[in-house]
Amino acid sequence: MGCALAANALAHQTGVCSPDDAFLAGLMHDIGRLGLLRFYRYEYEKMLKRLLDEEKSHSVLLKWEKESFGVTHAEIELESGR
């Protein structure tokens, strides 16, 4: 929700895009994580805990997702229409 509100505020300030579109994009940007949690709950929860414990970056999470599941949460978003 925080990302959605920030995206909305930035869109209001910059006029780059519709604030509503920005809000929706911010709200949905990590929706692919739900898919990974749904199908790989134990493994993904363990991965997220490790990420926090080791204070790793988002790029490390994407690398681990690709290695473990063959797909990243960002790629799942793009392919959700299949």
Image (tube, grey):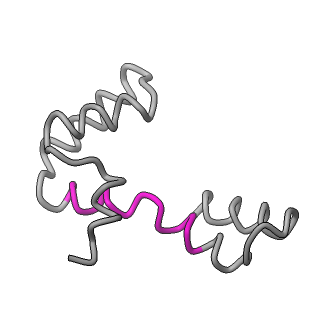
Is 76 left or right of 69, judged from the image as shown? right
Q: In this picture, is 45 found above or below 54?
A: below
At 42% from the left and 24% from the top, the residue drawn is 56
From the viewer's side, name the closer residue of 82 and 5.
82
Asked whether residue 12 is drawn in magenta, I would say no
At 73% from the left and 72% from the top, the residue drawn is 17
Asked whether residue 25 is drawn in magenta, I would say yes
At 15% from the left and 52% from the top, the residue drawn is 41
Determine which quarter of the picture holds residue 34. bottom left
From the viewer's side, name the closer residue of 12 and 75.
75
Q: Position of residue 60 (x, y in %)?
A: 36, 28
Span shown in magenta: 24-37
Q: From the image, which quarter does the C terminus lie in?
A: bottom left
Dominant SS type (magenta) = helix
Q: Position of residue 63 (x, y in %)?
A: 29, 32
| Number of numbered callouts drawn | 0
Q: Outermost residue, right direction?
A: 13
Q: Position of residue 37 (x, y in %)?
A: 21, 56
At 32% from the left and 60% from the top, the residue drawn is 32
Is 3 left or right of 66, judged from the image as shown? right
Determine which quarter of the picture holds residue 22. bottom right
Q: Position of residue 9 (x, y in %)?
A: 78, 65
Q: In this picture, is 28 found above or below 33?
A: below
Q: In this picture, is 70 found above or below 63?
A: below
Q: From the image, which quarter does the N terminus lie in?
A: bottom right
